[in-house]
Image: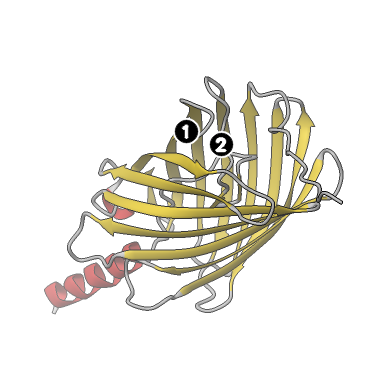
Amino acid sequence: MKKILIIIAFFLFSSDIFAFDISGLQPVSPYGVFSTFSSESLPKSKTSIELSLERSRERDFYRVQFKGAYGLTDHFEVMLTVPYVYDYLGSVDGVEDIAIGFKHRFYDEGKYGPSLAYIAAASLPVGHEGLTSGGRTGIGLILSKRLGPFRGNFNISYEQPGKDSLQDEILFASGIEFSATHDLDILAEFFARKVHFSKEYDQLEARLGYRLKTSDYIYTTVGIGADFKARSPEYRLLLSVSFTNVKGKNKVMKIYEEE
């Protein structure tokens, strides 16, 4: 009987681990909306780094992420995300798989059409046993379009985990930026994710917040998110600070209709 109880507890614990929402590659502010990528990228030879903090409730855990990006050209950017999780399920602490990747904008925004970029990513299987997917590889497409003070971003991505016991992940994400003032953007994001432990779109999450340009080289982002389907997480709190050697965000070219 004791052995049976141990086996049952093991499978219950394993199912909770598989339910963990692995972060993967993440954008660096201001070139994205929370976890939604923008087709905009760093200028050539410019660098950005970001430190983000996350508090999730039901499932309870804390996550710290170090993110970095470097512009190889004005259209090609390499990225890195190193996440660390604390107190997951009350006992699991450790690094998630480290994600690396690149983003290439192959079509610039026009008068009517959006800018287009693709992204390729891979996660190194170095995470804590309870926080790893065994590594994974993925690809995605990014569409971005500005209309007045609004900028919309849409992402679709596919990722294949290294563990055979996990499902492939599919993500649809949309993020909107509203330029309320010269230094303040209001942010809204919604995404639907078919996660690694399910064959259905079990994660439907919305996030709302703002991004403040606290100096020419520093951006601070604050947000709150909630899942509307499984209520997992019930809510999450987000805070990040990014540093860049680009003075202000890339200037946006205004397009006027000829009379």
From the viewer's perspective, tell me whether residue 37 is left or right of residue 88. right
Residue drawn at x 14%, y 77% is 4
Q: Nearer the viewer, residue 171 or 40?
A: 40
The answer to whether any part of residue 103 appears in the image is: yes
From the viewer's perspective, tell me whether residue 112 is left or right of residue 123. right
Question: In the image, what residue type sits under mark 1?
Answer: Glu
From the viewer's perspective, tell me whether residue 127 is left or right of residue 227. left
Q: Which mark is residue 77?
A: 1
Residue that protrudes farthest toward the front in the picture: 259
Residue drawn at x 85%, y 39% is 182
Residue matched to label 2: 41
Q: Residues within 10 Å of mark 2 (few under 14, many from 20)?
A: many
Query: Which of the 4 image quadrants contains residue 209?
Result: bottom right
The answer to whether any part of residue 96 appears in the image is: no
Q: Nearer the viewer, residue 35 or 62?
A: 35
Q: Are marks 1 and 2 in contact (CB under 8 Å)?
A: yes
The first of marks 1 and 2 along the sequence is: 2
* Residue 67 percent coordinates (x, y): 50, 36
Q: Nearer the viewer, residue 162 or 158?
A: 158
